[in-house]
Image: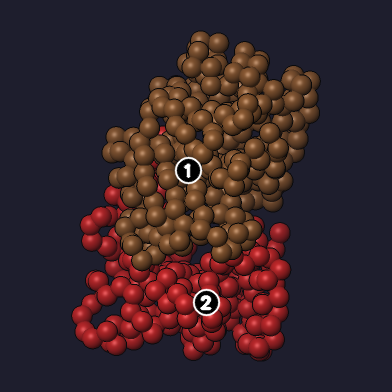
Amino acid sequence: MRVTFWGVRGSITTPELSHARYGGNTPCVAVEYDGRHIVLDAGMGMRWMTADLLDREPDRKLHLDLLLTHCHWDHIQGIPFAPLMYLPRNSVRIYGRGGSDGLAKTLLAQMRPDFCPVPNFFLREDIGADVVLREIENDIISIGEARVLCRELPRGNRAPVTGYRIEYRERVVTYMTDVEYPRGPRECPQAIDLARDADLLIHDGQFLAHERESHRNWGHSTIDEALELARLAGSRRLAIFHHDPSRCDAELDAVAEELKNRHECAFPASEGLLLEV
Amino acid sequence: HWDHIQGFPFFAPAYSEKYRLKVHSVRRPHPSMRDLLSHQQDVNFFPVPLSSLESHLEFVQMEEAESYSMGPFRVSCRRLNHPGITAGFRIEHGDDVVAYVSDVAPSRDLLLAEHVGSGSEETILECLYENQLALADRATVVIYDTFFTPDAYQERKHWGHSTTQDAVEACKRAGARHLFLFHHNPDRNDQELATQLELDRALYEDDTFTMGAATEGCTYRLTAREVVPCG
């Protein structure tokens, strides 16, 4: 499996030069295998991801399976700006949970003309890719030869999010973002199971240890909590993800240094990074 | 539109009771600006509702062409040709004027006729163009939507943006001093913008008119119609 990070920043895009190396695009991770493309979250990185894919395969009919962890803006804001969505020859299947209104209504709300400067391709047969939505909760889905486990994960006192475990030919990539463990990862068996023996665990690490108490119920994890989960689950590589918008490149470099002492292979994810699993 | 409001929930002073925030926009029918910003912070999409913001938050609907006092500035607004209710702003201080004209499409095809007075499409388009000139009238600085190249505009007239040529024409007709190209197309990188700017400057600048590309992080001092980079 080839994993590419197209956006690793939490909450809001951060285009400032001080954040350019790790990047300012909001979450989007692509997993490629057998010519298939699974896209994890549709933050602004999805614009770049689909533009790159169209460059590489200009005439092919493309299909994406988009797995959404939840529908906060930073995880869906790339959809209206992803060029692939505008080409009728393509198809996209979107999996997720849609909050109080259901997935369709939630995604359509983003396309409202009051707000959205681009045409609503969901509703227009002439201009959009063929889009199918599928609401999921705790499910197991097949995408080609891959088996994908979808599991509800806690988010402090907020509505739960979905974590994903992608299994393909004995390799495992697990994606867990915007999670907050009310009593630590130790007390969250579904999180440990999802990350068990993962070759690559991509986990929320928005906060530093000293930021934990002042950010209770903000819906994110600390780097320590990500490390603890990786240890408990036996994950081989850990990519810290969803960097706080205030965390500049110099600060993330310091985090990278510290992580070398804490785990065999842990690092802060940066946009543009490509890993083979 | 998202690109013009998406930073609001991340504006730190809005969360502090020490601040008083007034959000001004041109008069619009339902939904109000407060409704729209509230929706952006709906619980399905964002963790903090607008109603929880600790600052003193007030929404002001402006009447077109009327002058409002805001501290040392006088501010007025006028509707622009764009899909969606859109207005540009004119900010006056002493002899200096900043005109913010974005988002705007050329007055060739009417993109939104709602609530722009009555009359034929031609009349409305003329009125909208006069609005641009009124905003930019003898301005020190005009910040103008130059999203499109002429070719790109041909393919996407309904998107609601203009070209550099449109901006220059409006500025020269209005007697404006300096133009900042603005609302850059996300598909154009730094090199492309810089190269195009050099060509445009050679073509359009003269003794009374200069231009540049708006760049984030840059500040300018305006004094008696001179525009000086600082910091």
Chain letter of mark 1 equals A
Residue under the image location 61 percent in, 16 percent down: A233
Q: In this orientation, does residue B91 appear?
A: yes
Chain letter of mark 2 equals B
Which quadrant holds the N terminus of chain B?
A: bottom left
Residue B169, horizontal then vertical, whole percent: 51, 87
Which is more foreground, mark 2 or mark 1?
Answer: 1
Give the structural element (helix, strand or loop) at label 1: strand
Which residue is tagged 2?
A: B152
Residue B36, horizontal then vertical, whole percent: 32, 51
Which residue is tagged 1?
A: A66
Residue under the image location 65 percent in, 50 percent down: A16
Image quadrant assignment for residue A212: top right
The shade of chain B is: red
Marks 2 and 1 sit apart, C-alpha to C-alpha, by: 30 Å
The shade of chain A is: brown
Q: Label 2 amino acid?
A: Ala
